[in-house]
Amino acid sequence: MSKDLKNVASVSAITIISRVTGLFRDVVFFAVLGANSWSSAFVLGFTIPNLFRRLFGEGALSSAFIPVFSSIVESRNLKNAFSFFNIFIIRWVFYLSVIACILVLLLQVGITLGLFPERWLLSIRIFQSLMPYMVFICLAAIITGALNVLGRFFSPSLAPVVFNLVLILVLSLGALLNLGSQELVVWLCIGVLLGGILQLGLPAFDLIRQGWKFDKIRETESDKDYFKGFWVLFLPSLLGAALLQINILISRLFAHSLDDVSVSFIYISSRLMELPLGVFTIAIVTVFFPKMSRLYLQESKHAFSQIVEKGMRFILIIVTPATLGLCLLSREILSMLFQWGRFSVDDVIATAPIVVIYALALPFHSIATFLVRAFYAKKDMKVPLRLSLYFLVLNIVFSIILMNIWGVYGLATANLITAIIHAYFLVLASHKSFSISFLRVMGRVLKPITIGSLSIALICLLGKFLISIFEYNEKTEVFLVLLLLIPLSVLSYFFILSLFGISFGRIIRALKNSA
């Protein structure tokens, strides 16, 4: 196995572990706290520092830093790269600390002047206490970027797992000590800060082992040029990433304005949708993106269009069964994962329709994610950025209208409608920009996907009916439904695809060949 393939396998394995521990963290969180004003306040309070993590740490900041740091390593040497790194990280410690302090002080002024309604105060207090986490995690992302350039992937990938385990431990101890909701939230805030420190410390220790240390810092003219190059990459990426994160924040703010539990229901539903989005869609995007970039640089427009259409077919093939599974088995999945402790059957019943709506949006989010990367591959930031801005506004309008009709279900429906329209216009733009034909994409896979989907629906609906005849207790029935029907559905789906010449092995080989 080549070194690159080993790195991919290692990162993929740790990423899956991270997703699983993250899901288990959420399961324990709602089992211990339940769906109430305390859990909703924590979810909302943690949203903004977490969005800064996605915006700066995992998004624009690392995306702009890695090419610059890589160019210094290649054109000069590691010592010069670390010298620039020291200047860079000191500046960002200052920038992030100033942002954190300003936000905390502004919110405190607002609280003192009585600008916020009572129901928002707890979330704001939690947000203020968690702002140091934003600093820790963004610095961790910079260090992770440097490690990735040096070919180190394991410790950065392991850091989120450590964070999840810390929160699971904190919640479990709180439950054993029978702490009240208020004390649990305090413990959680401490756990987030401790987890953030460990997420920073783990990659930092690894980078020290690679030779990083603080020497005398002297900024040269070359360093100034590198910073200019960084800002050229950073600012457009920041704006594009900000629109997506603002969309998430607005949905949660609207949900919190409805009642004390809607934020929790929206959060759980989005997490279940993000699991296949993160594991399957991002994996496909990761495999195809370098190939698309190379083909565009080689000015092979026809081959570029072909690889984009091929990637879209993979998206549809892989994401469709995940969408159907979430729709048909939403209540069983929620019951098995979340119906523990203080998260009741009534909470499951209330959340299940939201999961279905979010699941229906999954293929459209996946197509949009892939096509945005296709535009990035041809260095076109304007089209996806402009469309993201339009649909941020559109989502706000739909949310305001529909939440006043259907409440939290209206917010989920607004997300679905916006996702459909966003994907549709990205398909139109890709057709105009690089001659992508969605009809060509669908023409090759529509029939097998349709028949395979019908087999999934038949197995799930008939299987649930047959299992219910035996009158097991609720948890046993749910366990049997998931244990039997998910594997049977997946096997039937890919068996039908194989009858049309689309075998699972062929999919894997095609993905390897596209890398």
Image: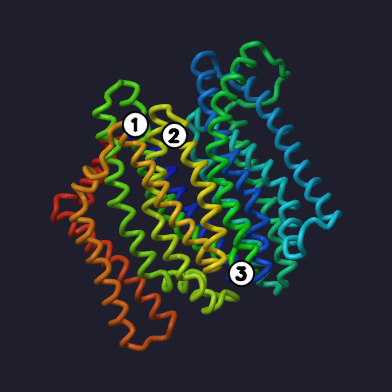
Tell whether label 2 touches label 1 (CB within 8 Å): yes
- Label 1 – label 3 distance at C-alpha: 44 Å
31 or 368: nearer the viewer: 368
Give the labeled residue for mark 2. 383
- Label 2 – label 3 distance at C-alpha: 37 Å
Give the labeled residue for mark 1. 433
Q: Quick one: SS at disc 3?
A: loop
> Which of disc 3 and disc 2 is earlier in sequence?
3
- Label 1 – label 2 distance at C-alpha: 10 Å
> Which of disc 3 and disc 1 is earlier in sequence?
3
Q: Quick one: SS at disc 1?
A: helix
Q: Where is residue 431 drawn, in percent x and y?
A: 30, 36
Please state if 432 lies on the left or on the right of 273 as rendered: left
- Within 10 angstroms of label 3, few (less than 14), some, or many (20 or more) residues? many
- Which residue is farthest right? 112
Name the residue at 61% across, 22% down.
Answer: 82
Is residue 147 visible in the rendered image? The answer is no
Tell whether label 3 touches label 2 (CB within 8 Å): no
404 or 86: nearer the viewer: 404
- Within 10 angstroms of label 1, few (less than 14), some, or many (20 or more) residues? some
Q: Quadrant of the N terminus?
A: top left
